[in-house]
Image (cartoon, rainbow, N blue to C red):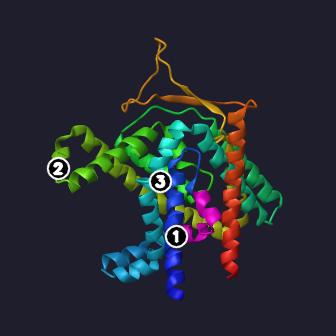
Amino acid sequence: MQNTRTLTDKIFLILKGLGMGAANKVPGVSGGVVAFVAGFYEEFIYSLQKFNGKAFKLFINGRFKSFYTYVNGRFLSLLFLGMIISYFSVSKVLDYLIRHYELYVWSVFFGMIIGSIYYIHKDFKEWNYKTIIAMTLGIILGLSISFLSPATENDNLWFVFFCGMISVSGMTLPGFSGSFILILLGNYVLLLVDSVNALYDTIFDVFEGNFTFFMDVERMRLLKVLAVFTLGSIAGLVTFSHLLSYILKRHKNVTLSAIIGFIIGSLGVVWPWKETIYKINSDGGYLYDSAGERIIKNYERFMPQLHTETYYAVALIILGIGIVLALEWYRQKTRKV
């Protein structure tokens, strides 16, 4: 019975990783919210925080088993396995759905974030002037980010490293969408579409025994960009986890209230009814990046009119709320067993 329960826990942890990976890929949605709602946020932060000097010494001295135990390796490895699987499966499906059913996808995520706000808020009892101010500042910051205009693509490796550090913060800071930050920095297509597709194609080539990609200058450029982006992400993940671990230990209530505010502010990013505004050149045509994608200037949000499409969208918002509440109900039920 215990082995079955352990196996079940492992499967659910991989599924949570799938959820985090999918959320991280969607602009406006934060993988950290998934961790928060699924109940493993603090364990995730404290596990990452274990990557310190002691862990480095254990690894260098060849004490790999002690290193694995010290950094909570089983938890992190299963979680990241789910994220990797998601990157090449669930996120691909989401890319397709956003391209063809954008309004409906945003509606589901909008509802899920509303459900997440309710879930986090209902258990938070420490309201005072400090936590209310922190929540208000979180809302203002979240809304401010959602109305910024995107920059143009930049493949400078130092900038790519910086993008990796900033974008990964969406995994550690609920409400802070790393993929949306990449859109603002102008590198979403380069880092989360072109580079990932280049890696995907390369893996297939290797399995087929085809190594001609070494002669493909563009492929090698994208792989180099992806490698630097990954290094930046790892550096950011460890750095932010140490910072958040420190803050959570000393100012937990203020930090949690700020996170609630930030998640509320992030609703501005995932508002379903918005029109994408593209950059136009002097001749009146669209401006394109190196991947042939139109360069986004901004999003124009609007209030929906009442028609069938709007009713479907509202129904999907309710579905999104219901998904989060159902997950919470299931979690409470398994706790009692």
Q: Nearer the viewer, residue 81 or 265?
A: 81
Relative to 327, does residue 29 appear above or below in the rendering?
Answer: above
The residue to which callout 2 is attached is 210
- Mark 3 element type: helix
As drawn, which residue projects farthest toward the top?
283
Q: Position of residue 264 (x, y in %)?
A: 71, 49
The residue to which callout 3 is attached is 90
| Badge 1 amino acid | Leu
Q: Earlier in the sequence, mark 1 or mark 2?
A: 1
Q: Is residue 327 left or right of residue 243?
A: right
Q: Splitting the image into 4 quarters, where does residue 61 fall?
A: bottom left
How far apart marks 3 and 1 lie (CA) works out to 16 Å
Quadrant containing the C terminus is: bottom right
Relative to 101, does residue 6 appear above or below in the rendering?
Answer: below
Residue 112 magenta-highlighted: no
| Badge 2 amino acid | Asn
Residue 39 magenta-highlighted: yes
Q: Position of residue 218 (x, y in %)?
A: 26, 38
Q: Position of residue 192 (x, y in %)?
A: 43, 45
Q: Are marks 1 and 2 in contact (CB under 8 Å)?
A: no
* Residue at 21% in and 54% down: 206
The residue to which callout 1 is attached is 13
Q: Is residue 237 left or right of residue 308?
A: left
| Badge 3 amino acid | Val
